[in-house]
Image (cartoon, rainbow, N blue to C red):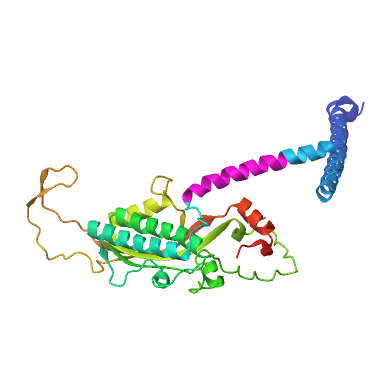
Amino acid sequence: MSKGKSNSFLPGYFAVLGLGALGLGYLAWSASSSAEEAQASYQSTKDSLDSMQRGTIFPNAENEAKKKKLVDALATKVKTLVDGVSKFQSPINAAESGESFQKKLVATETAIKEAAKGRSINLAEKFSIGFDKYADSFASAQAAPQLAAELDAVAFLLNTAMASGVSSLDSFSRAELDIEKTAPPADPTAKPGTRPAAPTPPKANPQKPVAAKGAPAVEESKVLERQTMNLVVTGSNIAITQLLSNLANVKPGDTGAHFFTIRMLRVENSMKDGPDKTVTVTMEEKEDPETKTTVKRDAKYILGDEKVTLFLDLDLVRFLDPASETAAAKTPAAATPQ
């Protein structure tokens, strides 16, 4: 008898190996078939979706009702958003005129100076709130409403700085609004109550721009406006920190609230040489400003007692109402009251 016949392990081993190879072959064929079916299903679904996105809604009553329901739901969400952000800005008063704005400007400047004096805050010799050109001339009828709203925001910013505990308002400036550059100057010979002719809008570009890949669906200028300002203040470390905190956590209230974004921030410390190491510190009794109790101190503050100058480049963000923009676009130019 041969050794192969006497040893039954080898035939069994090769038999199991063969069955395993057949099983693996079946599994590979099955997986390949399933992958091809999944790929075909995906491609079919994708082609169907592309076709529906490129196509138009079939004009039947059911589709029109579904479309209206979706549009109404979107309009409700947009209105809720607009109502929420409108609390962070002064409303545009269309009845504001160049004369009324000038009166408001004088009253605001006087109030800021009196507030600074009451808080013992130093105002720079030539400190201005950024509307000097309207001190002796009227703003145009088109620009006055927006200027009055911006004036409210400037007053809010300066009052917030003073309430934060700064020791001085060093300088303030603002960039002109677009409407100040395009609107014609006020006509001193015009009769009271009349409005100058609306400025000629720029010619539209006939070529529709193609949105770049990854670009936002709506241009920023259609939903918000940035009004650039620059503020320089000096105060303690705590006051500067408090000012930044107050600007970052504005809340609508009785005094109003405005949405500012900081573009650039620079801090300059008045103590550039560090503390004097030759000064001898002696035991002193002082009143703790927090607890109002007398305490003994034999140490001197090294950090936190210096003056800090803060340079702020920031934008006042005004959120535009899509409804009013749409209404303005639909209003014919000939219907503008003169």
Percent coordinates x, y for residue 173 in the rendering: 40, 68
Q: Is residue 12 above or below residue 247?
A: above
Residue 145 visible at all: yes
Name the residue located 38 percent from the left edge and 64 percent from the top edge. Answer: 231
- Quarter of the image where the C terminus is located: bottom right
Left or right of 258? Residue 26 is right
Give 103 or 4, whichever is nearer the viewer.
Answer: 103
- Quarter of the image where the N terminus is located: top right
Name of the residue lying farthest toward the front: 191
Quarter of the figure with residue 273: bottom left
Q: Residue 74 lies in magenta, yes or no?
A: yes
Q: Residue 9 lies in magenta, yes or no?
A: no
Name the residue located 37 percent from the left edge and 51 percent from the top edge. Answer: 246
Residue 164 visible at all: no
Percent coordinates x, y for residue 51 in the rendering: 85, 48
Left or right of 275? Residue 196 is right
Give 47 or 318, whichever is nearer the viewer.
Answer: 318
Q: Which residues lie in the magenta part?
A: 70-88
Q: Main secondary structure of the magenta part?
A: helix
Q: Is residue 180 above or below residue 324?
A: below
Percent coordinates x, y for residue 229 in the rendering: 44, 65
Name of the residue lying farthest toward the right: 1
